[in-house]
């Protein structure tokens, strides 16, 4: 925590490198795969939205409150974006913030009863309340479109392909512009989440997980902070939801169901939640597994089920526990002095 | 719509409450002993239904025998859960809970691979016809659930209060450390609790097989309801689970009859939220979890 | 108007009456001890004042402001801060970081400024003041040690340091020397005296250890069976018949 500032400087080089690689991804993909690269680029877009989602979920878990309705919060963002864009023609730079505000309001309402519970009851309570929201989507044909959901969500007006970037997949879809929009918003959200994690609030949330009684005694209103983190996590989940709504162009209640929620848990569990880097590793590695298992997609839940169980049983800390070991290994390899 | 459908609705509510009780009691007993929380309790229910589909419809066993057989079969899956998931993650409720979500995925895939996803499996009704008592018309098939539930809950009560292993199980639920000092084997008790838990879910699924459509994803709705029931009743309280099951059964039946089944679920969830606000320990629970 | 004033405070748990109409007046700058046999209701009394329990009836006023029924975090913001019987700390952080966190938590900035603002200056001041507090309490040698690696005595001292980090006016210590050896006890007694003498912080403590209480406190309040039994200077209490009877009648040893 005290080292946060220096850590930021130490770590911003790798981060900058990754962002530059992502910025040139459309060019690279076009070079390697031609028009097929467009399909890969969509995968990369979904990946970025998933990273934001997983990172916001990790924020939520810093107080020790795991929820089962994070996908519902994301869905709230997606639905609000879709409704505003489809029925009222609201441009993207308004739909995204308005959706986030609506989601924060819904998060607040969900968090109120939940803040009375902790641990396991919190977990299942959030499940039931999330299902409640999903029933509303299924039940109301206007504006949520009932169980068939909303389709033909207009794409954001980001200009013609090649207008402001030089990548052209010679396709009718201006995919690369949407990609860059996604990248900018994702980087923005991830930087904010990082700042939040190392801020006074981040410390307060972690302290609540460590010892909530002690926090009360030194002047933290634990209930209020737990509601606050729920709303903040909802805000970022909503950003991810807006991104996905624009990418898919159609959403329905099943997009935000329990199965998706379990996949989110798998990402976060496999990566680990103790550090900021855990969910990034988790989403990256699990997306890779997801793509590699494409030929056997009917067995996919089985494969992920086995991964989830074995990582909980054999590596409860997640893959992130390997980071210090790996960096030490590489530092020894190149002979740099161990800085601790 | 008027008063004339009231007896009918009450009858339906009792049937629904019974099936909820059967599923939720299993969840409560597993949670009571070493806080084993099973995310995929609904999938155990689903496997119970498949037992009837396979033994009764495909193999032609008598229906009663198929239902009875579902108890040990699903109980065995419960024991496997305990051995492979709950024992290694003991002490961390959430880890066990999340891992069983993965186990649910595995069961769904295995069942779909063996029997296909396609069309829902239809199980012919073994007890056709229905009662015509006091202006109610409930099929015998549904009505049969009530005595079976009563018998099983009574059997469980007898086991927990009169039989040595059952008493040990209760002791273990109250104070695991003290019971270990008394010479009770913790691993045996957790396995036993999961066996009972699985068995109840299995019989519940078996009884519902001729009534609902049997498919690999049928457990989901029952899992949600069972969770709501145990929260409302007080986690790990078996009388609480039974009471809450009938309350939820009445809420769902009445709202479904007079409005719509989705509204029934929504009001059930709201009821749970109110209970959480007013009494976070649940109706009959005393432990805040 | 006294500094801390408790009037007819009662706390019932169902049918059990843990505290029955207890009155207490604490003056600014004094060290007040609350003693009593096991299960007398001292800890309950302590928890009610610090807002961890809601009182059944009665009132608590701090500097003329009614604080009974207020949330514990609000009470601590008003300057009444408690410690715990157990070693309550954030084990994954160093001593310095623990104290800095305790100061952080009460800093009053918004979520937005926490994300976008530059906290460097405030942070430096925080660290400086935290180091001062640690030095003052004699934990200077351990400032970079991990909290979980400290000895029990040092962990309890750190607990006090964290409470002090919030700059309280009334420090409430819950059995500050529980589980300590005689050397550690002496250090703690010296520390509490120093906090009062040099920083003028009023201290209210619950303690089992008679010798410590007699050494440390200006005045002592005795609670038995949920009611106030006696009040006075250590000497008065030592010679009070009712107190002697209560302690001889109780099972636990007084040493």
Image (cartoon, helix red, strand yellow):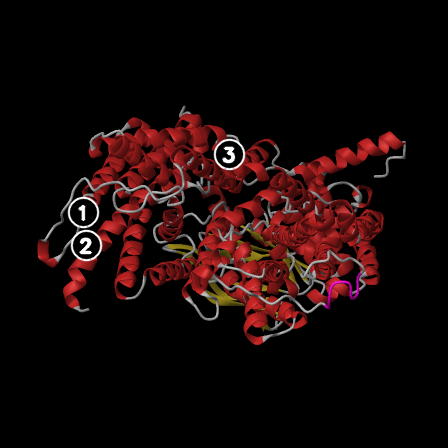
Q: Residue A240, how many percent across, how many down?
A: 63, 58
Q: Are marks 2 and 3 in contact (CB under 8 Å)?
A: no
Of marks 2 and 3, the one in the foreground = 2
Quadrant of the frame with the C terminus of chain A: top right
Q: Are marks 1 and 2 in contact (CB under 8 Å)?
A: yes
- Depicted C180 relative to depicted A225: above or below: above
Q: Which mark is residue B11?
A: 2
**Residues under labels 1 and 3: Cα distance?**
40 Å
Q: Which residue is mark 3?
A: B90
Residue that appears at 19% across and 39% down: B126
Relative side of A26 to A133, left or right: right
Task: Examine the rendering and report whether any part of residue A119 can be seen.
Answer: yes
Q: Which residues are magenta?
A: A159-165
Label 1, secondary structure: give it.
Answer: helix
Which chain letter goes with mark 1?
B
Q: Residue C203, how many percent across, how many down?
A: 66, 57
């Amino acid at each position: 925590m005290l080292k946060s500032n220096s850590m930021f400087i130490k770590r911003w080089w790798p981060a900058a490198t990754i962002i530059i690689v992502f910025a040139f991804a459309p060019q690279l993909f076009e070079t390697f795969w031609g028009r097929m690269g467009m399909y890969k680029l969509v995968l990369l877009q979904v990946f970025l939205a998933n990273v934001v989602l997983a990172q916001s979920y990790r924020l939520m878990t810093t107080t020790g409150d795991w929820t089962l309705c994070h996908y519902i919060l994301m869905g709230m963002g997606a639905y609000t974006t879709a409704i505003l864009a489809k029925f009222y023609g609201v441009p993207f730079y308004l739909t995204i913030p308005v959706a986030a505000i609506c989601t924060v309001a819904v998060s607040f309402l969900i968090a109120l009863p939940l803040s009375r519970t902790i641990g396991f009851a919190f977990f299942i309570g959030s499940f039931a309340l999330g299902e409640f929201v999903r029933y509303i989507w299924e039940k109301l044909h206007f504006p949520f479109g009932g169980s068939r959901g909303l389709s033909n969500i207009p794409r954001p007006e980001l200009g013609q392909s090649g207008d402001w970037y030089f990548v052209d997949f010679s396709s009718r879809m201006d995919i690369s512009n949407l990609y860059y929009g996604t990248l900018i918003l994702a980087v923005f959200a991830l930087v904010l989440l990082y700042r939040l994690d190392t801020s006074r609030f981040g410390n307060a949330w972690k302290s609540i997980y460590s010892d909530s009684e002690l926090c009360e005694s030194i002047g933290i209103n634990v209930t209020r902070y737990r509601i606050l983190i729920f709303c903040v996590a909802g805000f970022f989940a909503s950003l991810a939801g807006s991104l996905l709504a624009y990418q898919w162009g159609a959403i329905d209640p099943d997009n935000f169901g329990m199965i998706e929620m379990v996949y989110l848990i798998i990402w976060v569990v496999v990566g680990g939640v103790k550090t900021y880097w855990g969910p990034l590793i988790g989403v990256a590695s699990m997306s890779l597994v997801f793509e590699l298992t494409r030929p056997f997609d009917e067995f996919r839940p089985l494969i992920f089920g086995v991964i989830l169980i074995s990582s909980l049983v054999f590596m409860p800390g997640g893959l992130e526990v390997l980071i210090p070991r790996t960096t030490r290994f590489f530092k020894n390899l190149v002979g740099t002095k161990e800085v601790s | 719509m008027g008063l004339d459908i009231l007896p009918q609705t009450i009858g339906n509510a009792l049937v629904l409450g019974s099936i909820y009780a059967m599923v939720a009691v299993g969840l409560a007993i597993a949670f009571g002993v070493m806080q084993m929380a099973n995310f995929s309790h609904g999938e155990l229910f689903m496997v119970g239904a498949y037992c009837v589909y396979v033994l009764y419809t495909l193999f032609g066993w008598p229906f009663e025998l198929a239902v009875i057989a579902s108890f040990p079969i699903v109980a065995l899956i419960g024991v496997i859960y305990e051995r492979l998931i709950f024992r290694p993650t003991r002490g961390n409720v959430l880890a066990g809970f999340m891992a069983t979500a993965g186990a649910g995925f595995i069961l769904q895939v295995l069942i779909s691979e063996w029997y296909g996803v396609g069309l829902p499996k239809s199980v012919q009704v073994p007890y056709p016809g229905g009662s015509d008592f006091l202006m109610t018309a409930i099929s015998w098939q549904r009505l049969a659930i009530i005595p079976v539930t009563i018998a099983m809950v009574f059997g469980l009560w007898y086991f927990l209060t009169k039989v040595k292993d059952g008493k040990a199980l209760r002791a273990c639920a109250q104070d695991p450390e003290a019971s270990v000092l008394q010479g009770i084997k913790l691993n045996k008790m957790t396995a036993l609790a999961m066996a009972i838990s699985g068995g109840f879910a299995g019989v519940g699924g078996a009884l519902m097989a001729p009534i609902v459509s049997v498919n690999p994803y049928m457990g989901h709705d029952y899992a949600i309801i069972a969770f709501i029931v145990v929260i409302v009743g007080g986690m790990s309280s078996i009388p609480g689970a039974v009471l809450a099951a009938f309350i939820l059964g009445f809420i769902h039946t009445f709202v479904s009859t007079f409005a719509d089944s989705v509204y029934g679920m929504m009001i059930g969830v709201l009821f749970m939220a109110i209970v959480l606000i007013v009494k976070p320990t649940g109706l009959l629970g005393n432990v805040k979890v | 108007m006294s500094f801390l004033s408790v009037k007819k405070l009662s706390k019932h748990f169902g049918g059990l009456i843990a505290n029955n109409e207890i009155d207490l007046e604490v003056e600014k700058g004094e060290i007040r001890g609350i003693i009593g046999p096991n299960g007398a209701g001292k800890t309950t009394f302590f928890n009610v004042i610090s807002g961890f329990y809601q009182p059944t009836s009665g009132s608590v006023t701090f500097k003329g402001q009614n604080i009974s029924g207020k949330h514990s975090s609000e009470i601590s913001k008003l300057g009444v801060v408690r410690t715990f019987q157990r070693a309550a700390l954030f084990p994954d952080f160093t001593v310095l970081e623990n104290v800095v966190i305790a100061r952080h938590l009460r800093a009053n900035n918004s979520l937005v400024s926490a994300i976008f603002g530059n906290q460097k200056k405030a942070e430096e001041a925080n660290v400086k003041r935290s180091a001062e507090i640690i030095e003052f309490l004699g934990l200077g040698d351990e400032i970079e040690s991990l909290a979980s690696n400290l000895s029990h005595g040092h962990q309890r001292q750190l607990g006090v340091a964290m409470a002090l980090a919030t700059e309280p006016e009334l420090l409430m210590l819950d059995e500050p020397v529980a589980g300590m050896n005689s050397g550690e006890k002496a250090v703690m007694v010296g520390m509490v005296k120093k906090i009062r003498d040099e920083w003028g912080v009023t201290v209210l403590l619950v303690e089992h250890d008679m010798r410590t209480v007699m050494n440390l406190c200006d005045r002592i309040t005795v609670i038995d069976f949920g009611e106030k039994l006696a009040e006075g200077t250590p000497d008065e209490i030592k010679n009070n018949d009712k107190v002697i009877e209560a302690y001889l009648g109780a099972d636990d040893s007084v040493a």
